[in-house]
């Protein structure tokens, strides 16, 4: 989907907030520090964005947080169905968006979760997450109605890790990230087997190493589940979600332990995935960027898990924009 640039809206929003370029840059740097975004935000860069240069993904996320708008509302990309189109700023709108309540921001971010199959209830999952957040912030010590397990999967660059981190930050549930748990060991194992540390595309990795990664991840999750600890698993889960038997086995493990299991697939468009992968510059992604078309040909962009699941619509970064806004509200950010 082509992106239509209307970067002059950035200037209109900045002027509505009565900010100079230098002041806007300072606030963007504060936002970048809070959200770990790679933003230098000098006034020359901001001026160029306001005069036709399209901002990269980290700048766009920072602008959305600063001006309390989505990328579509700022004219930085086309609006998805149901989204607001680019807006002309007025003071009443600005004040309304600036003073978002924490609960409202959390619920809005969770609004990107939709039922992927008829046998799941998106409202129930959202309510469970909100209740966990309320227990952490308003009623500490109150027990949950049994542990929760959320599997968050998606292609590289889809936004799955950002969404998993958001869920973990809101609920306090333990995050088990496959790469965090296994990356260093995987690299050394690949070298010991005669491969390269950052290889994620060879038969050696897929047949000898990848199964061990996921085995470790699932076993750690099961140990937490046995102890009644809620967990969020963050991994692509491409092969696993394509196997109805695998999903059923995990459900069979959870059911007798009275665990609420939710499978979440983060959907994203190929342009946004490539931009994010390219911008983060991780060594393990180099092969993808060097042979993007070949890599893309291996992906089924219409893939969905073969079992009960939810879908997060993160096309054009729409879901992560709402996550960023909620995080900023919860952290006490704002003008």
Image: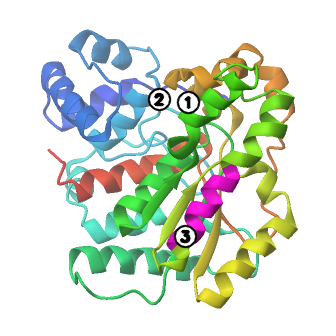
Q: Where's residue 316, x and y in %? A: 58, 40
Q: Magenta segment range? A: 214-224
What is the x, y in percent for residue 135? 29, 80
User: Magenta includes 222?
Assistant: yes
Residue 265 appears at what percent x and percent y?
67, 57
At numbered mark 1, what does the secondary structure look like: helix, strand or loop?
A: helix
Name which of mark 2 and mark 1 comes first in the sequence: 2
- Indicate left or right for 219 with 200 as reference: left
Residue drawn at 48 percent across, 87 percent down: 146
Above or below, 200 relative to 313: above
Q: Residue furthest front?
A: 192
- Which residue is denoted by mark 2 in the rendering? 57
What numbered label is drawn on residue 223? 3
In magenta stretch: residue 136: no
Looking at the rendered image, the quarter that the C terminus falls into is top left
Residue at the extreme top of the image, as rendered = 44
Residue 276 marker: 1
């Amino acid at each position: 989907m082509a992106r239509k640039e209307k970067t002059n809206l950035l200037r209109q929003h900045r002027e509505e907030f009565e900010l100079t370029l230098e002041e806007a840059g300072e606030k963007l740097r504060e936002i970048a520090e809070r959200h770990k975004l790679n933003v230098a935000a000098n006034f020359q860069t901001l001026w160029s964005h306001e005069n036709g240069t399209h901002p990269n993904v980290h700048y766009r996320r920072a602008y959305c947080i600063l001006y309390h708008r989505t990328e579509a509302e700022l004219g930085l990309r086309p609006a998805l169905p149901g989204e607001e189109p680019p807006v002309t700023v007025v003071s009443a709108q600005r004040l309304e968006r600036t003073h978002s309540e924490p609960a409202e921001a959390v619920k809005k971010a969770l609004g990107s979760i939709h039922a992927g199959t008829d046998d799941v209830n998106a409202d129930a999952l959202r309510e469970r997450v909100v209740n966990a957040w309320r227990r952490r912030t308003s009623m500490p010590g109150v027990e949950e109605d049994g542990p929760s397990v959320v599997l968050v999967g998606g292609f590289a660059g889809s936004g799955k890790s950002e969404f998993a981190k958001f869920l973990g930050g809101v609920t306090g549930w333990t995050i088990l990230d496959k790469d965090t748990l296994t990356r260093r060991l995987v690299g050394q194992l690949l070298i010991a087997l005669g491969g390269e540390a950052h290889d994620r595309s060879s038969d050696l990795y897929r047949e000898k190493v990848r199964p061990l990664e996921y085995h470790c991840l699932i076993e750690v999750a099961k140990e937490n589940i046995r102890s009644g600890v809620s967990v969020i698993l963050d991994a692509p889960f491409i092969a696993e979600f394509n196997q109805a038997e695998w999903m059923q086995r995990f459900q069979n493990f959870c059911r007798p332990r009275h665990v609420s299991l939710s499978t979440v697939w983060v959907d994203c468009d190929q342009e946004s995935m490539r931009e994010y992968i390219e911008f983060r510059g991780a060594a393990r992604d180099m092969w993808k960027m060097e042979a993007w078309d070949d890599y893309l040909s291996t992906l089924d962009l219409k893939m969905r898990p073969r079992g009960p699941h939810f879908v997060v619509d993160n096309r054009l970064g729409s879901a992560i924009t709402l996550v960023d806004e909620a995080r900023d509200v919860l952290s006490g950010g704002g003008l």
